Amino acid sequence: MASETDVLDSVPKQLWIGGPVDATGGGTFAVHNPADGEVIAEVADATPEDAVRALDAAAAAQADWAATPARERGEILRAVFERITARAEDFAMLMTLEMGKALPESRNEVRYGSEFFRWFSEEAARINGRYLHAPSGTGRILVHKQPVGPCLAITPWNFPLAMGTRKIGPALAAGCTMIVKPASATPLTMLLLAKLCAEAGLPEGVLSVITSRRSGAVTQPLLDDPRLRKLTFTGSTEVGRSLVEKSAHGLLRTSMELGGNAPFVVFDDADIDAAVQGAMLAKLRNGGEACTAANRFHVQRGVLAEFTDKFAAAMTEQVRMGPGTDPDTTLGPLINSEQLAMVSELVDDAVSAGATVRLGGKAPSGPGWFYPATILTDIPGGARILREEVFGPVAPIVAFDTEDEGLAAANDTEYGLVSYIYTRDLDRALRVAEGLESGMVGVNRGVISDPAAPFGGVKASGFGREGGIEGIEEYLSTKYIAMT
């Protein structure tokens, strides 16, 4: 692995619009290491004028990129996958430095995120239409798929690589150009990816990265420009609703991967040891800062004590909190002081309402934005922690008695991204999975994300799918051609 300094020095700090370019006016902003709050880099602070420059480049490149043979597009994506793989340790270190997660978590993200380029490199050549006889006998029906056009992707800070690659991969495979606006907390990973894409032969203008502290001001000119034809966003439901409203004027194609409040349901016939290890993955992956993180643990009363005891023991034995670059660390810091304050506030609210702290429950003193692995029990029904997305390593546990009660409790949320269930009963697994109001269900699994599977939610968790054969459809328009 290269040194931290070497990795940071290898990353472009300018905007990426056909290559590295300064922001208009030369403004920059600081990127901080969550482990100690120190500044690790200064990157270009884009202006609205810079966003229009990026759209100019995307619009200019669109026709040629769409006309590029699918196999050639796929080979470029495959070459990017290989470059990411070759620099996997550099990407892992970079994400740990700017986002805080432990190095093992960052390495997992590199493996996961790079796979979207490999998967969609193969899907590029499998964009299919239809040809059929009109039932009336009056002619032929030709159904043709073509790229929607220039796209804007707005990505979050919690998975700096994967949240970009699962949008960029299908867009480029479909023949679309794309502008990426990464989160201001974690812009470095996406800038390094843009550099690797250029090295792999991606033509200028096909992918631009605009970094800025002011997401709304920078992206609004793009949403108002008729040349932009698609918006894809991963982030909070509140921001997603606002973006849908802003994109309505231009009638943009949109896909929204928004907030979650995932239930983790353990039935009394479950393998409790397997459920505990699944809970560790579902809760503590990425330090709990994931939309797929288990947010509420609903445990059938007959196994409540056993599950809680074993879950607390596993957290005590397996979790080591510290800077993400420390090889012994399994739980790094939260992203910033605001997130730390929010997690602390939700725990304090639950405790003040009568919840019991079984483990953790208090942020340590000292530098960095750390919060320990925490288990709460005896949660009152009206506690905010059961309604709001925690986005931290906190596990509230509540009991239920019957299957119907457990299902109702799991569905008692405005969100519907993912749910987890543990049971040995196949009939129950299918019955409950079909009854859960979520876009994805993990059955006896604590991690469900897979580039080959359609990722997405329902209700306030958004719409559209990323990954799988469905993922590329988000970037394709359907054209019907009538022939005599």
Image (cartoon, helix red, strand yellow):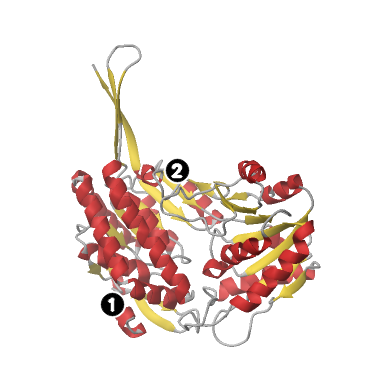
Q: Quadrant of residue 338?
A: bottom right
For the C terminus, give its image quadrant. Answer: top left
Image height of 316 relative to 82, above or below: below
Give the number of callouts.
2
Judging by the rendered image, the residue that carries numbered circle 2 is 248
Find residue 261 and report its horizontal and vertical position in percent. 62, 56
238 relative to 174 in the view: left or right? right
Judging by the rendered image, the residue that carries numbered circle 1 is 10
Image height of 138 relative to 159, above or below: above
Q: Name, please, the residue furthest toward the right.
A: 354
Q: Which residue type carries mark 1? A: Ser
Residue drawn 33% across and 44% down?
226
Image height of 312 relative to 453, above or below: below
484 relative to 295 in the view: left or right? left
373 relative to 183 in the view: left or right? right
Find residue 341 and report its horizontal and vertical position in percent. 62, 73
Residue 16 seen by the camera: no
Residue 195 seen by the camera: yes
Q: Which residue type carries mark 2? A: Ala
> Sequence-wise, which precedes: disc 1 or disc 2?
1
Element carrying mark 1: loop
Residue drawn 53% across and 63% down?
290
Find residue 103 and report its horizontal and vertical position in percent. 45, 76
Residue drawn 67% across and 66% down?
395
Distance, label 1 to label 2, CA atoms, is: 39 Å
Q: Quadrant of residue 77?
A: bottom left
Label 1: few (<14), some or many (≥20) within 10 Å? few
Label 2: few (<14), some or many (≥20) within 10 Å? few
